[in-house]
Image (cartoon, rainbow, N blue to C red):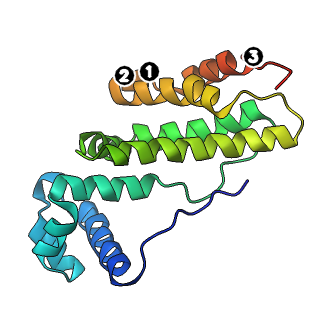
Amino acid sequence: MAIKEAARPGGRSARVQEAVHQAVRELQVAKSREELSVPQIANKAGVTPSTIYRRWGNLAELLADVSLERLRPDDEPPQTGSLAGDLQAWGEQYLDEMTSPIGQCMLSDIMASAERERRERCCRYSETIMACLRERAVMRGEATPSVEDLMDGVIAPMTYRLLYDLDAATPARLSRWIAQTLPSVDSSD
């Protein structure tokens, strides 16, 4: 199953969004978060600050939107030949990204957003990955849990640890979550 790109707005709106997102990404490399401001971002993007305020409301919402865009899956997850292996390979890559300082800022930005829809889109991204991995496993003839069970058994504990107990967000724990999730597969699925 290919990871499908969600529809993006077209025309001027898309150009403004891309210019502003690019400006944020470039400024984040050169400046600390505390040094970022809407006027700086607007100047770098070639738009007025009022354009940013009209579209995003404030700097926090803009940063959350940029972070969410960075979390959008671009490629299919690695293929190892088994659901357990695919989950482990993808999960280790995700943990590595999300335990980094940049990953932690992205998660914080999204969780701090006043827009619940951003957190829901993160959930949809994870569901898309789990559906892709599950579909591969089904095509190989493996018994597989539902996407919901994969979300509850692997994504939920991983997300909890990333948000509240970073030291426990480890590949070893990931292996345990996967092992606890996969044996529960009913062969009649």
What secondary structure is found at the residue carrying circle 2? loop
Image: 70 above or below 178: below
Disc 2 and disc 1: Cα gap in Å? 6 Å
Q: Residue at x 35, y 74 (%)?
A: 18
Asked whether residue 80 is in view, the answer is: no
**Residue denoted by label 1:** 168
Frontmost of labels 2 and 3 is 3
Quarter of image, res 166: top left
Residue placed most toward the observer, 114 or 33: 114
Q: Which tag, 2 or 3, sits closer to the chain's start?
A: 2
Asked whether residue 76 is in view, the answer is: yes
Query: Which quarter of the figure is the C terminus placed in?
Result: top right
**Residue denoted by label 3:** 183
**Residue denoted by label 2:** 165
| Residue sticking out furthest to the right | 141
What secondary structure is found at the residue carrying circle 1? helix
Disc 1 and disc 3: Cα gap in Å? 23 Å
Q: Are marks 1 and 3 in contact (CB under 8 Å)?
A: no
